[in-house]
């Protein structure tokens, strides 16, 4: 397990480095396979016009080259498998980190929601409404000025601009 948590960028850089190194090995293996197949083809073409015993020798040499190509392709397959496993492991680590952060964030959101819900439930909205009505009855001039000012601010804030 990783001792310290990696950032997404660090994990991507690490996977990219491993992928570049692994793809270099795959490229070398595929080049060897191609070279072996080319050699086998050349030997077969060379042996076509010669005597039967030379054709037999050519076929045996071609068989050796084809076996070498088979080994090189198997090596390339193994390297690609290792790259895929490494990428999968990094993705799992990143997923676990993101999931942990998500769960912590959800817990915090639930806590804040609970606090807000509690404060709202403690408020007496009907009582506040009654206090506002009483204030307007006692101070009608101030209430009108406040309403005009609030209307002006809302109108100014929501007007369309060019």
Image: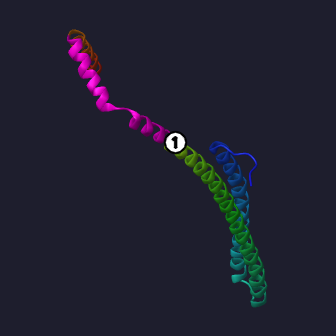
Answer whether residue 22 is visible to the viewer in this image: yes
What residue sits 56% from the left and 49% below the top? 103
Using a 10 Å C-alpha cutoff, classify the residue at mark 1 as few (fewer than 14 neighbours), some (14 to 19) or many (20 or more): few
User: Residue 141, image x and y in percent?
Assistant: 21, 9
In this rendering, the count of numbered labels is: 1
Q: Is residue 38 above or below residue 150?
A: below
Up/down of 25 relative to 155, above or below: below
Vertical placement of residue 73 versus 114, above or below:
below
Judge whether residue 159 can be spotted in this image: no
Q: Residue furthest bottom?
A: 52
Position of 32 relative to 14 (above/below): below
Q: Is residue 117 magenta?
A: yes
Colour setup of the view: rainbow
Could you say which quadrant of the image residue 49 lies in? bottom right
Observer-nearest of 70 and 102: 102
The residue drawn where x is 79% and y is 85% is: 57
Residue 138 x/y as whole percent = 23, 13
Range covered by the magenta-colored residues: 112-140
Residue 93 located left or right of residue 64:
left
Residue 27: x %, y % from top left: 69, 60
Residue closest to the eye, 70 or 108? 108
Q: Quadrant of the C terminus?
A: top left
Image quadrant assignment for residue 121: top left
Q: Closer to the camera, 128 or 101?
A: 128
Q: Secondary structure at mark 1?
A: helix
Prevailing secondary structure class for the magenta stretch in the rendered image: helix
Residue identified by numbered label 1:
111
**Residue 127 sits inside the magenta stretch:** yes
**If the image is split into quadrants, where does the N terminus sit?**
bottom right
Location of residue 41 in the rendering, given as x and y in whole percent from the top left corner: 68, 75
- Of 125 and 160, nearer the camera is 125
């Amino acid at each position: 397990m990783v001792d310290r948590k990696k950032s997404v960028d660090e994990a991507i850089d690490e996977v990219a480095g491993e992928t570049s190194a692994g793809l270099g090995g795959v490229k070398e293996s595929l080049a060897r396979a191609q070279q072996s197949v080319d050699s086998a083809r050349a030997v077969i073409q060379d042996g076509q016009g010669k005597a039967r015993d030379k054709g037999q020798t050519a076929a045996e040499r071609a068989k050796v080259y084809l076996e070498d190509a088979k080994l090189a392709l198997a090596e390339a397959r193994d390297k690609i498998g290792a790259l895929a496993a490494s990428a999968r492991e990094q993705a799992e680590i990143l997923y676990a980190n993101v999931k942990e952060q998500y769960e912590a964030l959800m817990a915090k959101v639930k806590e804040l929601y609970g606090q807000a819900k509690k404060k709202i439930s403690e408020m007496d909205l009907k009582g506040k409404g009654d206090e506002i009505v009483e204030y307007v009855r006692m101070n009608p001039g101030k209430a009108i000025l406040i309403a005009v000012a609030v209307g002006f601010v809302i109108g100014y804030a929501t007007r369309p601009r060019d």
